[in-house]
Image (cartoon, helix red, strand yellow):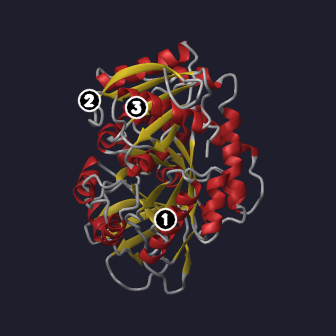
Amino acid sequence: MKRNRKVKILATLGPASSEESMIRKLHEAGADLFRINMSHANHDVMRTLIARIRSVEAACGRPIGILADLQGPKLRVGKFAATTVELVPGQTFTLDNRDEPGDDTRVYLPHPEILEAVKPGHRLLIDDGKLHLRAEKCDGKSIVTTVVSGTKISDRKGVSLPDTLLGVGALTDKDRADLDAVLATGEVDWVALSFIQRPEDLADVRKVARGRVGLMSKIEKPQAIERIDEIIELSDALMVARGDLGVEMPLEAVPGLQKQLIRACRKAGKPVVVATQMLESMISAPVPTRAEVSDVATAVFEGADAIMLSAESASGQYPVEAVSTMASIAFTVEREPHYPGIIYAQRAQPEATGADAISLAARQIAETLKLSSIVCYTSSGTTGLRASRERPEVPIIALSPVIQTARRLSVVWGLHCVVSEEPTDLDDMVNRACRIVVQEGFGKPGDRIIISAGVPLGTPGSTNMLRIAYIGSDGLSGV
């Protein structure tokens, strides 16, 4: 199944899209990989969804990636005697460690790590920022606050702490159990880590994952922004989680941060996903708003690797339409006259490595000679990532003998992944590349392609060779 766009689409599965027939429709409409939200899926549901995705993969003959999104620490207040209480800006309100129903003066906060970490002057945002509190006195057992804005608080509402660095890791007990279950399947390609605050959060997870899945850091806290370069270095990919990021930071700052994060990931050669509320109105409407179309287009113009649907495909009334709409927007944007120039202007300088030099040369040769495609042989996925980092105008076909690599690369910009046996020698490498280019619809007899690979063949991380080849008249061999 040949895609006619470079940016990838990540669709979340849920009640509206859990049946195999619907998963197949979403894939055919344009979804390149699927997200399983562990906040809502138990282990049995997760395994069922994985089996159905793999069944669709087998039927369609294309590698499909799977992302398991861990819930992360959910910080919530306790309950109230009256369920909901009214507050007045300027009044005093206390959060404490007394496990008793709250009233209009106090509420239980079942998170000692918050009570210990918050300092006077820190902000506490309740219910996605609808209630804004400012800490005045903190003694480790209670936080006396002043109501800055908002008039209401009710049972179990979430707490956001934009100014506070919590002394706990990103993995809760639930996350550890979910991660173990995910790894046990051997079928999940990416794990998304919620509420990353610091590089150490990733180091803990790496010890458990041991390279069996790619680690995608969700950037949704200001503390992560402060150490973003270190987090990118330790991550395999990034997700710009604009929902929670927009709660803990000024809304007007989020678009600029999105651009910064995309460019930082492109420079590092790490995939980046833009997520949250991209086509939010399509949860209940068959068409998006003009502003949502512009939002998706901006992410595509920026060169994001993937754009994500959340509730639109998981629980909305129009999941297939949401995916096809997103695919249509991406297709149209990538054919805008200004698109190549914008992508070129944002291109990062290559690092002083052989792989980057080869990838840069492949892109320049392919565009100068107007070749039909770039073919890269990649066992670990690194060669594919470096080829994508260049954002070439011509298609990139990533050939890998490792199905797990092909699936993981399904999130990467511009890569058309094909599972293929390792070539036996250089002639076989050229012939195989030419044959697959024709079979996949990216070239025809007489076209030229450029091939990047490592010699000796089959050695991971040894990309050191470029070869220009003509596709033979039989469409099965190269010259």
Marks 2,3: beta carbons within 8 A? no
Residue at position x 71%, y 48% in the image: 325
Residue 230: where, in percent of width, then height? Answer: 29, 40
> In the rendered view, would you say 430 is above or below 132?
above
In space, the residues marked 1 and 2 are separated at their CA atoms by 41 Å
Eye-nearest disc, 2 or 3? 3
Tell whether 175 sits left or right of 28: left
Q: Amino acid at mark 1?
A: Asn
Residue 104: where, in percent of width, then height? Answer: 49, 77
In space, the residues marked 3 and 1 are separated at their CA atoms by 42 Å
Residue 27: where, in percent of width, then height? Answer: 61, 55
Q: Amino acid at mark 2?
A: Pro
- SS class of the residue under badge 2? loop
Marks 1,2: beta carbons within 8 A? no
- SS class of the residue under badge 1? strand
> In the rendered view, would you say 457 is above or below 226?
above
Q: Which residue is mark 2?
A: 456
**Which numbered disc covers residue 428?**
3
> In the rendered view, would you say 213 is above or below 44?
above
Front-lying residue, 125 or 322: 322
User: Looking at this rendering, what residue extends furthest in the top direction?
Assistant: 368
Residue 9: where, in percent of width, then height? Answer: 58, 48
User: Looking at this rendering, what residue extends furthest in the front direction?
Assistant: 474
- SS class of the residue under badge 3? helix
Q: Which residue is mark 1?
A: 37
